Image: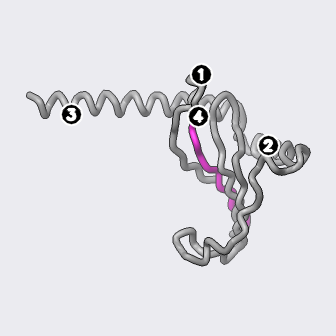
Amino acid sequence: MDFEGEGEENDDDSVAIFEFNVTVNKNGNLLKFACNAGDNIHIRNIDYYPVGSPDPSNLAFDNIYHGPEFDELEPDLQETFHTYLQDKGIGKDMAEFICMYSDMKEQKEYVKWLQNVRRSMS
């Protein structure tokens, strides 16, 4: 599984939302889960890429059906996908870790920025 992500603030100021992707590779077939981490894991979309699919930078990539929005799926199917991710260790604990790690990383970047600004002003 691969993870990639970025953070953004939620509109209601109570919980920061961090976007990330989980990619599961099984025999060259890829399932890419576009997720949010906040108080729990929330799946936004699931893409399926069979072996030999075009690279996302390739124009042919736009012709691939990427599936419906996750919230348009039947509730039982949504639960099945959540259970699948939980079985792979992607659940509430992971959401909490992503949020804590992202906050820590942002704080370190802020301190580094302050140090660089201070050096440039002295």
Q: Which residue is mark 2?
A: 82
* Mark 1 residue element: loop
Residue 14's disc number: 1
Report the mark closest to the observer, 4 or 3.
Answer: 4
Q: Position of residue 48 (x, y in %)?
A: 73, 64
- Return the disc, 4 or 3, that comes first in the chain's sequence: 4
Depth check: 103 or 60 in front? 60
Q: How far is the residue under mark 4 from the one under mark 2?
A: 18 Å
* Disc 1 residue crowd, few under 14, some 14–19, many 20+, Cα 10 Å: few
Which span is picked out in magenta? 17-26
Q: Residue 104 lies in magenta, yes or no? A: no
- Residue type for callout 1: Ser
Report the mark closest to the observer, 2 or 1.
Answer: 1
Residue 17's disc number: 4
Q: Which residue is mark 3?
A: 116
Q: Position of residue 97 (x, y in %)?
A: 59, 31
53 lies left or right of 88: left
* Disc 2 residue crowd, few under 14, some 14–19, many 20+, Cα 10 Å: some
- Which SS does the magenta portion mostly show? strand
80 lies left or right of 39: right
- Return the disc, 3 or 2, that comes first in the chain's sequence: 2
- Return the disc, 3 or 1, that comes first in the chain's sequence: 1
- Residue type for callout 4: Ile
Q: Are marks 4 and 2 in contact (CB under 8 Å)?
A: no
Q: How far is the residue under mark 4 from the one under mark 3?
A: 28 Å
Quadrant containing the C terminus is top left
Q: How far is the residue under mark 2 from the one under mark 1?
A: 24 Å
Residue at the (42%, 32%) spot, across then down: 106
Residue at the (22%, 29%) spot, across then down: 115
- Residue type for callout 3: Asn
Q: In the current view of this chain or complex, which residue is farthest to the left?
A: 122
Q: Position of residue 1 (x, y in %)?
A: 64, 53
